[in-house]
Image (cartoon, coloured by chain):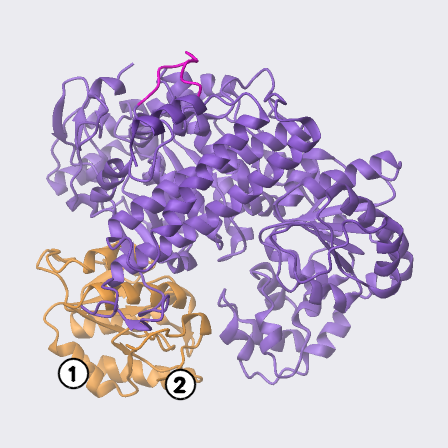
Chain colours: A orange, B purple
Amino acid sequence: MPHPQHLVNILTGIKGATEMKDAVPLAKIIKKAERPLLVIGPRALELEIDGRPFIEYLVEIARAGKIPICATAHTKKKLLELGVTPESTYDIIEIINSLKNPEWKGVKGEGCHDFVLFGGIRTDLGNQGLSALKHFAPHLKTMTLCKYYYPNANFSLPNYRKDEEWKTLLEGLIAGLK
Amino acid sequence: MKGKKKKEAKEKIIRAEDQWEPIGHTPMPDVTDLRNWDRRLLETYKPFYAPFCDLCCLCTYGKCDLTGTNRGACGIDIAAQQGRIVTLACCMGMSAHAGHAAHIIDYLIEKHGEDYPIDLGDQVNVECPNIRTVLGLKPETLGDLKTAVQYAAEQLVHVVSSTHTGQEGDAVDYESKALHISMLDHVCMEAADVAQIVGFKFPTSVADTPIVDMGWGSIDASKPVILVVGHNPASSAEIIDYLRKKGLEDKVEIGGICCTALETTRYSDKAKVIGPLSRQLFFVRTGIADVIVADEQCIRTDLVEEASKVGSVVIASSDKACRGLQEVSDKPTDEVVKAMVDNGKHVLILDHEKAAEVAVEAALKIAPKRKKEKTALIDKAKAQELAQACKECGSCEEVCPNLQPVGSAIKKLAEGDFEPFKQVFENCIGCGKCEEACPQDIPIFQLMQAVASWDTWKCRAGRGPVMDTEIRKVGAPIVLGTIPGVLAFVGCSNFPNEIDEIAEMVDEFARRKYIVVLTGCSAMTVGMRKDKEGKTLYEKYPGDFDAGGVVNIGSCVANAHITGAAMKIANIFANLPLRANYEVIADYIYNRVGAVGVAWGAMSQKAASIATGCNRLGIPVVLGPHSAKYRRLYMSDKEEGDWTVMDGRKKELVDTEEPSPEHLATVVESKERAMVTIAKLCIRKNDTQPGRQIKLNHYIDLYKKFFGTLPDDLHHFVRTERDIPMFFKKEVKQFLEEKGWKPKPVLSLPTLIGTYETEVPIEATIR
C-alpha cells in the first residue's frame, strides 16, 4: 500500500484506498454513481496546474459529469466568479457529518449521495474526514482528486511528483465524463 | 455510588451549614450525576468521530480490527473506542492541570500555611465560580482549594478506570465521562490560578496590566540568560525573588516560553516573553540561554539533548518531567553549580528555592564562558550557502505536521530568495521533524535564525479573573445580545498559520465590538503582529472585559476564568445561585450567553479537556483544520435537527426551528470560514430583537465579505421581521420571500430543563 505524501496521514489500519492512476476506469466508476457529489475545498484556490487554478479543473469535472458541488470554507466566492453556483455551502465537516446519514436529503433534496469526490481539502483534515466516512458511511464511496494519496478514501490518486501527470489524469477524467 | 454517609461527607466538605446560597441538586457530582444533562446535549449535538486508527491496540486480545461492523475481542465497536480514546485524552489534559494545581497549592501551603486566605481584591467577590458551581463550596483558603482538587482527583480515578478493557462500552456514555472530567478540569485550573494569584500576589482586580516586551529579540544576550519553560511558576518566581534579594534583577535576563512566560511576567515586569510553544526549539538552538529551567507540560522531551548541543545547561524542576537526570536537591549549591559550569551537567532539583539559587549562580558563571555560543547565529549569506546542499528530495515536506513547503522554500533560499523560507518559519510549529528527515543534514532550524524577525513585540501581562464590576456592566448587553459575543481565543500554537490568522481574527472581532479574551500561547501570538503604525493589538485595543476589549486573561490554567466569567453572568447579572447548581447554570449559558471558544492552533490533550469542559457548560468551540485529529466533535444535524426547548414561563415545549448554537464543537478549514462560523455560533435563542439584529448584521457582513452573498441559511436565524438588520433589510426580505420563510415562535424563557429527565424544576431557571 502506498504512503501518503504527508506522513502524519499514514494509515494505521488495514483498510486503505485503491490507488487510481488511469482516468478511464475512474470516469466509469463515477458515471455508475446515481447521486455523485463533488466537495471543493480552499486549497483548490491556491493550487495551480500548469498556470491554471485547480478549482477550474474541478468545475470542469462537475460540468462534464453533471455533478452537484458543495463549496466548503470560503470557496463559494471564487465559484460564483467562475459562473458556478454551488448546490451547498456546508463546511467540510458539516457535509461529511450529513453524508454519514443514509437518510439525508442530499444537496439537491433528492436523497443522500452514493459517491463523493473531494478536491482541495488540506490533507490532514481531508484524511480524517474520509476516515469518518470510511467507518460510518458504508452506503457511499469516496474518491480524492488532489495530487496526493489519501489512505482513508475508497479511491485515491497517487502522489504525483510531476504536475503534468496530475494534469493528464484530470484532463482524461474530464474527457471521460463528457 | 450514592449513600447517606457519602452525602454527609459531601455536606461536611462543602460546609453545608454555611448559608451563602441554597445548595443545588448536584453538590460534588459523581461520574453519572450530570449524565442526563450530557445525554440531552448529545441528542442535539451527536458525537462526530473521525478515527485515527482502524484498530484497537490497548490490550493483548488485540490488535483488533474495528472497521465495518467488526468489534474488538472484548466486544467494543469503533464508535465506543473513539469515545474511549477521547475520554483518555481529556483525562490526560485534566490530570496535567490537576497535577499542576496540587503541586502549586502544596508549595504555597508550605510557604503560607493552609489557612492562607483567598483575596482577589476589591473587584472580585465571586472568587471561584467553577468551584462554587460544581462542588457547592465557597473556598476561603488555600486549604479549600486543595479540597477541590482532591475531589477532582478522586473523580479522575473513576473515569480513567472506565477506560479499562471490559468497562464502559457505549460511545455516548464515554462522552459523558469525558464531559465530566473536563468540567473538573476547569475546577482544577481555577484552583491552580487562584492559588497562584493569592500566593504570588499576581495582578488581580485590575484590567490595565503592564505591557511587557516579547520576542527573542527582546533578550539582551550580553547578559547571563535564564530561560524558563513550561507552566508552573514556582521556580521562576523563586528565581525572581533570588535576583531581587541579590540586587541582580538588571544584571540577569529572565525570559519564558509557553505559559511559564505569562506567569513570570505577572510576577515581574522585567521578565520577558520569548514566545509561544512553537518557538521553543528555535530559541533553544540559538544558544542564547545559559541556563534552562524546565517545569512541567509542553516542554520538549529532548530538551536536555538540545541544550547540550549549544552548551546550555538544564535544571529540571518537576517530578513530572525528571528527564533521567540526577537529583541534586540536597547537595550543596556550590557543588552543583561547579558541576554545571565545569562539566555542563544537567540536574534535577525538586526544591524550587534551591533550583532558583543554582540557576542564577550557574548563569552568572557560565555566561562569560559561552560568549561564542551565544553569538553564533548564522547570517543570511551563511544560510544561503548551507541551503545549497538541498537535493530537493522532499523528505522535509513529507514529515512536516503543518504541511509546510519546507523543501521548496529551502531551494528558493539557496537562490537568494528568503521570503518563502521566512513564511515557512512564520507557520512553523517548531517540531524539528524536517531537520531530522533531511538526508543532507541541513541545519534547517539554524537557517531560521537568518530569516527570523529579531524585532520585538508587546504582550499585555495576564490579569486573572474577570472582575465582578465588569460583569455587572456587560452582563445585560451580552445576554440581550447587544454586545454580539464573547470570544475566547485559546490554545497552543502554531497550527495552521496561527500567528497571522489569530491576529487577523482578533482584530476583526474587536473592531466589531465583540469582547475578545485570550489565554496561553494564543495570548502571545496575538501580540506578534503590528499594524502600520507599529502597534500590536494589545496597544491598539483596551484590556477591559467590555465591547472592543482585547484581554489577556493569563496562562492555560486561567482558562477557568473564561468559563467562570460566563458563570458570573448567570450569578451576578441574572441572580441565579451558583452553589452546586451546574445544570441550571449551564442551561443559562447555553441559551443566553453568546460565548464561543476558538482553539485555532490547538495541539495538546489539555486543549481537548479545556474545550470539552466548555462544551458541557453549553459553550461552543471552533477548532482549526488539523484538529480533526482530535477524532471527535459535537455536531448538530443543522436545520434538520431537533431544536425543541421548553418555554420556562409558559411551561410549554416549543419547536424553535432555529439551529442555535449550531454546533458545540466543530472544525473549520480556513480563517475566513472560522470568522463566519464564530459570528453565527454567537446566536442564542434568548437574544432580544435588537441583539439578534446586531448579531445577524455581523454574520451577514462577514459572510458577504468572504463568500460574496447573503448566508444560505439566514432564514433559519430570522425569527420575526424585527430581527432583520436595518442595513440589509431590503435584500434580506427578498431572500426570505424566495425561501418561503415564515415567522418562528417567540419565546419568553428558553430552557432545556424540562426537556429531559432531571430533578431540577423548571422554576429553578427563573429569577
Secondary structure, mark 1, is helix
Taking B198 as reference, is B361 left or right? right
Q: Does the image show residue B537?
A: yes
Q: Nearer the viewer, residue A58 or B120?
A: B120
Q: Residue shown at 37%/58% (left/top)?
A: B628
Residue type at tag 2? Glu
**Image-quadrant location for residue B84:** bottom left
Secondary structure, mark 2, is helix
- Residue A160 spot, x, y in % from top left: 40, 83
A104 in magenta? no
Vertical relation: A175 (above or below) B203: below
Q: Residue shown at 67%/34% (left/top)?
A: B266
Give residue A164's mark. Answer: 2
In the rendered image, which residue does mark 1 sit on? Answer: A28
Q: Chain of mark 2?
A: A
Q: Please name the predominant secondary structure of the magenta segment in the image.
A: loop
Contact? badges 2 and 1 (CB < 8 Å): no
Q: Nearer the viewer, residue B201 or B711?
A: B201
User: Do the residues indicated by labels 2 and 1 lie within the same chain of the protein?
Assistant: yes
Q: Which residues are magenta?
A: B14-24
**Image-quadrant location for residue B425:** bottom right
